[in-house]
Amino acid sequence: MLDKLKDFSSRFFVTGEPMIYGADVAILLTLAGIIFVLTYLKKWKWLWREWLTTVDHKKIGIMYMLSSLLMLFRGGVDALLMRIQLAFPQWHFLDSNHYNEIFTTHGTIMILFMAMPLMFAFFNIVVPLQIGARDVAYPFLNAVSFWLFFFGAMLFNLSFVIGGSPDAGWLSYPPLSGMQFSPGPGQDFYIWGIQISGIGSLASGINFIMTILKMRAPGMKLMHMPLFTWSVLASCIIIIFAFPVLTVTLALLFIDRFFDGHLFTMTGGGNPMMYINLIWMWGHPEVYIVVLPAFGIFSEIVATFSQKKIFGYKSMVFSMMIISVLSYFTWVHHFFTMGAGANVNVFFAITTMAIGIPTGVKVFNWLFTMFRGRIQMTQPMLWTIAFIPCFVVGGATGVMLSAAPADYQYHNSYFLVAHFHQVLIGGVVFGFFAGLYYWWPKMFGFKLNDRLGKWAFWTWNIGFYVCFMPQYALGFMGMTRRIYTYDFDMGWGPLNVISTVGAFFMGIGFIFQAWQILHGIKYGERDVTGDPWNGRTLEWSIPSPPPHYNFAVIPTVTGQDAWWTIKEERKKKKAKETAVFSPIHMPKNSGIPFIMSVFWFIAGFGLTFHWVWMAIFGLTGVGACLLARSFQYNSDYYIPVDEIRHTEDSVGRVG
Amino acid sequence: MAYATAHHEEHHHEHDEGIKVMGFWLFLVTDCILFGALFATYAVLVNHTAGGLTGKEFFEVPGFVSETFILLTSSFTSGLAVLSMHKEKIKPLIGWLIVTLLLGMCFVGLEIHEFQTMVHEGATISTSAFFTAFYTLVSTHGLHVSVGIIWMISITIQLKRYGITSVTKRKVTIISLYWHFLDAVWIFLYTVVYLMGVM
């Protein structure tokens, strides 16, 4: 009995690595610390009532943001470990299996558990405020989306200390990810972590399309919408077309693993290339899902800090829509070497190059907006300007890769690694950082320190180029991706050392940002106006942080840059309008999204270890939660006028 | 004033219900793509039988034809339920929903029976790529129908409890959309999998 238990626990818990024991201790200490602090300060009830059960889009957005920054930390540590391993030839900092696990989790976490939730954070925090809405179309579903993401991410991260991490690459190509070559639970952690959070992403896509189409303030036509809202719409359209494919792909992989199916195994007639087609049918559009909102963010920032209307609004909208359509017709460029034939490769090469055109249009529009504008070099603007050269280089190398014959040379080399980091960090991460600095005062009511921000900006940027420029060269020198170690006589050593130094610079940049946030909480400059940047869109017309009903009175919109227009009119008239309040219809908080996601987590854990009883228990719980919700009829309430007047008075807005 | 608020409330709720129905249409778009991906997988793997048996040896014409008739009829009865709802007649509404439910259960029962026979005769999910794709595609549809049955039972209970209100109306509308959608998917299954399989 005791032996059995020992045997079980040695398979269940990941053992043998001092770093993992360290992580175990750190996780336990953090958990104990959190529990102690919450108990000591008597905050359990507060946590449940204000956060875990909330359906307020702003709070959900903040939770998305915090979890995503945590994941950025974890993915970043993975990156640094990889860079240490690769710094010197014949180096054995990590063993090969551990290295495989780290590059797999780094990719998965950065795309699915860092970029996606950070994007959803902006969707949640900004979109309803920009379109003059009180909430999203389905507030309850919104909470479900968040908690599914959260518990999916937790399930995935658990693999680090329990069961073992996946090690078949971030897209888990079979046969490597099949039962034969990945028999442990790592691959199933991958499948269910992503599957659960993916369902949430799909729901968010539907939610925000409906929010944008149906919840706009009166008078706001589609062509009056702020460009960030447009970019969210474009991104959500891609989500609802791409994410079902991901759901199917992961389910099929699980069927192969769990039921001994033969979809992707060569024995039995399966076709592994089928998987690669399917996963990239989601995977390539996914790139545009995360980058389009970044483009939206840049459009807002450039207009605000050039103090001008955006140049070429219509072409901006048009280009985003073109990108969202073209994004489905590029997936084969990920495997030009598949052997599909010249004609297929030519088609996908041309569509891939074509997508550069609308992207180029946008860059020129931003430049023309800045031209003859009164540019203010604030922190959001700094990141926007840094983005432009970075993305231009990334775009150029992308076109190089998209030329099918040339791709036979670059395929799976470090040139490719450098390219996609250049567009994903330069485009998405820089964009989201710009957005964080831009909307931070709106979220929390204080600005972040400028000096620390500049330090963060420069360390990140210098680090970025030092890290990735050598990798282009390494690619030409023949270094391939996912390589674990290399020989002295390859001559890759010096460039790899430089690259590692750059990576650490970016790590320092992240520390500056963490410091900046802590500094801001204590000393941050308060924003009492609600409009610290002299903004143009409606989110700046309400106090920071906004009251939970957002707008005491829903504004009427007459054109683009609604808040700017209102300000201009107020200057002319100089008269203050008195607002007439009426009761506000709001959704009630609910614990069901949280509880249901816990059941999903239990089901996912059971499926990961192939414990059918546990999976059935979890899924039954999910079903029970859905039924409970279906029988809940009393799910909203009205805020009385007195309460609105009181709240508005307390933030200095007299009705 | 009280009247005005009540009116406002009613108006607001109807607006809410409309948005929920539209959102469900969007969900159906995503479900279309889900099935599209499964159909694509099936189409790629349909001849990958690893030298073994094909569907032709296993598909029983009387079986899948009766499944088809039962499901098509259930789609019709769910339509009748919606018609009764629009006439504000609660009893036929509940009655037709129950008929739909029972037909749905018959369908699932027949499908399970079909699978059992096939497995018994030696065509399991791990026999070949073709059979993996077949079972995956058809049982995904079957799973959808089963979920629909539980969902419809819950709505029937709610109708008994609350009668026809704007909320229950929306729920019946959505479940019938879902049911028709499953019917449409089955027509593709019937054609692509079964008819083309036995021909």
Image: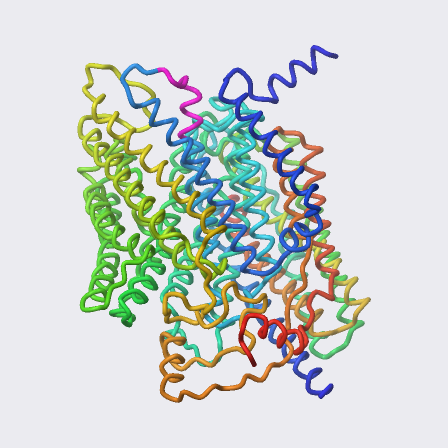
Residue A325 drawn at (x, y percent): 34, 58
Q: For residue A107, which quarter of the picture? A: top left
Along the viewing direction, whichever of B38 and A146 lies nearer the viewer = A146
Question: Does residue B42 appear in this view?
Answer: no
Please tell me which residue is depicted at 51% across the width and 47% down the height of the picture.
A66
- The single residue placed furthest to the front in the displayed view is A523
Q: Residue pushed farthest top?
A: A3
The answer to whether B88 appears left or right of B52 in the picture is: right
Residue A562 lies in quadrant = bottom left
Give the image location of residue A631, x and y in percent.
75, 60
Report the residue at 44% width, 46% height from top: B40
A98 drawn magenta: yes
Q: Main secondary structure of the magenta part?
A: helix
Residue shown at 69% from the left, 83% from the top: B5
Closer to us: B136 or B49: B136
Q: In the image, residue A77 lies at what x, y percent?
A: 42, 32
What's the coloring here?
rainbow
- Left or right of A492 on screen, residue A10: right
Residue A93 is one of the magenta-drawn residues: yes
Q: Quadrant of the N terminus of chain B?
A: bottom right
Q: Does residue A510 sit above or below A61 in this rendering? A: above
Exactly how many numbered labels are in the figure?
A: 0
Residue A158 x/y as whole percent: 56, 32
Residue A292 falls in which quadrant of the image? bottom left
In the depicted structure, whether residue A183 falls above or below residue A597: above
Region of the chain picked out in magenta, as a range = A92-103
Residue A9 shows in the view: yes
Which residue is located at x 57 percent, y 25 percent? A24
Q: Is residue A131 left or right of residue A469?
A: right
Q: Is residue A463 above or below residue A245?
A: above
